[in-house]
Amino acid sequence: MLEIIKLSKSYKQKKVVDSVNLHLDSGETVGLLGPNGAGKSTTISLISSLVSPSGGDVRLHNESILKSPQSLREILGVVPQEIALYMDLSARENLVFFGKMHRIPNSRLQKRVDEVLEIIGLKDREKDIVKTFSGGMKRRLNIGVALIHEPKIIIMDEPTVGIDPQSRNYILETVKKLNREQNITVLYTSHYMEEVEFLCDRIYIMDHGQIIASGTKEELKNILSQETAINVKVELVKHDFVEALKNHGNIKNLSIQQSVITVIVPKQVNMLKEIFKIAEEHTTNVLSVNIVTPTLEDVFLHLTGRQLRD
Amino acid sequence: MWRRPRELIVLLLMPFILITILGSALGAFNDGDIKVDAKLAVLLKDDPKLAQEKAIKEIQHAALSEEEKTQKIAMISAFNPVDIFLNEVIETKELKKVLKVTVVEKGLSLKEQKKYDGILEIPASFSEQFYQKLINEKGAEGKWKLAVADNTSVNATVIQDIVASFQKEMNLAKTAQQLQVDYGKIASSQTKVSAIENLTKKKEIDAFSYYAVGMCVMFVFYMGTTVADFAYQQKEEHIYERILLANVSPFAYFAGIFAAAFFLSFIQLNVLFGLTALVYGVTFPNIMYYLCITIALNGMTASFSVFITAISYVTNSRNVESIFSSLIVPILAFAGGSFFDLSSIGGFMERIGEISPGGAALTAYLKVIQGFSLYDMTEQFQAIFLFTGVLLLASMMLVGKRGAAR
């Protein structure tokens, strides 16, 4: 349906997006995963024709849209990372305004606005001014505006940034419902691994402007099929201890979250004994040790050497 | 707009308050302070009486019928331009108030020349050549030479206007005589001199009228910057990108900004002028003329708004609007005479005032109050249309096809 071929963008000789290849098939939900500054938002701007690429092509049904993006824009809904709404207007007024921008006939517009308000769960607040809304409600309306013209493809750029868990769940459920019930194709970017795992059929992992891995969740996890992840919970994370682990020949990657140190090691190596030995040498109290199957987070760590939220 | 009371207050209440303050505080200072005291030296090298007698003699000895001779002699006797100018036109009551004429027969020293705003030289053979042309349509026509000290001063303008108007009348009368049409006693007629008309009418503008127009013209530009500020906010908040994604062309978007600024400034001006009419009795005698200027000014304001928006979109900077509202608009207001009447300074500043964006509109409005016709405002309309066109063209070039989205 939508194909991105060797898409590149440079600003003052710096490559922000570097030969990105990506495709979206009708009705699927695809995740674009990467840390802040990986180039996800620029890629979205390039795909949605707001920015002209330095190289490459964007093709819709095998036709390039670079010179005349109108055909893509007609079926594309974009949810920007920012709240792109009129704060002084009500929820309904915003939807009506953007509906008019999309030239939805008046006879259809009011009904469509009602439908969208139902989808985003703001029917009871439709007349309230947006600036009085909570962060989660604004995010929902931000999605609603992108849905007003009944797009076939929707691109969501980190739509859950900075909101409470309840609103986040609502948004994730809404996206899933849109995909399932209305067969909308979704490109979902996030740096929250669990969101992408929950929503997406296929995932692209992006870092430093490049796609460094892609596939289904299972395919990506298979990258680490020969490895095991060990979570070591310690009383106090000591620098010496961490350095000693890092320098160990069998430890491929290491990450720290609060007092849990995660190391990726080859499956065939028994590292438990080694870890305890290093802990003893550096007088570190180990509280617990868990051997787990590697997650996408571990895959990302393995591929980039850093965590998603770094 | 009503959801943003701050802007509403700034754009509607502020100018009204300023009209009140400036109108009452500077009223006494400004009212009727346009004084013209022009001094003209006429260097008369010609002897019109002698030329007239010579011309009559020539006709008497010419091979013409008696009837023709009588007709031509009557024409010459009735038509002596130098005499008409010196003894009748500049002796009129209206002109005497503003123009002092000294007739000299030989050249003035440099020191003496400095005493006058203008020196009019009537060459030695002027009348003789004039009659030759009138009777026989032969030979070159003599011309008066006018030299003014300061081309841009009010006094010089008055002298130039008087001489030019007189020459125009004389040409008409001469043609009428040749065609034997009764042009009337032009010499004794009350020749209307535009400069005098201007001056007497200018005095009718009181301080409230002046500042009502001055403040409205200044604050209409603030409407332009306010709309540009709103528009930039749309870019900052990524609404502009959403609009582009709805397949709206950048030009259509900017046309929307133009329409918004046009509409809002139209309402603003009408509310302000309506209020000043109600409270201070400042009215426009010709509503159609008022509407013409208002619409032209709205167009210029809208272009100004589009231009600021285009720069801020391209540079991705809110500072652009700040620079315009805190620096450029006050400069335009100053140059346009919104703070004080630049014609009281005269010269270069007055000229700038008349053709600067705000000044052109201000001058045109004042002319409507004074009772001038639209034709008299041609220069102001030209200036307004020129600025509108240049601003729109520059905006289109800045925005380009992609619309400066990022």
Image (cartoon, rainbow, N blue to C red):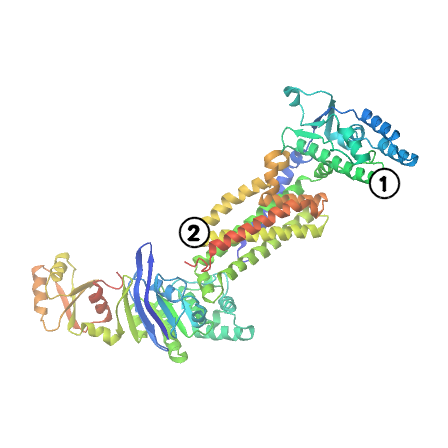
Camera-nearest residue between B348 and B122 = B122
Please state the total of marks drawn on the protein image. Answer: 2
Quarter of the picture holding the C terminus of chain B: bottom left
Q: Position of residue B25 (x, y in %)?
A: 63, 37
Residue at the image point whose x is 56% and y is 53% from the top: B302
Res. A292 image quadrant: bottom left
Give the Cα distance between marks 1 and 2.
72 Å
Q: Residue furthest bottom?
A: A181
Q: Quadrant of the N terminus of chain B?
A: bottom right
What's the amino acid at mark 1? Gln
Viewer-closest of A183 and A163:
A183
Decide: few, some or many residues near mark 2? Use Cα within 10 Å; few <14, some 14-19, many ≥20: some
Question: Any mark on residue B180, and which?
Answer: 1
> Disc 1 vs disc 2: which is toward the camera?
1
Residue that numbered label 2 is attached to: B317
- The amino acid type of the residue labelled 2 equals Ser
Q: Which mark is residue B58?
A: none
Specify which label sits upstream in the sequence, 1 or 2: 1
Residue A208 appears left or right of B167: left
Assign a secondary structure to mark 2: loop
Badge 1 crowding class, 10 Å Cα cut-off, few under 14, some 14 to 19, many 20 or more, is few
User: Which residue is nearer to you in this view: B127 or A270?
Assistant: B127
Residue A99, above or below B382 = below
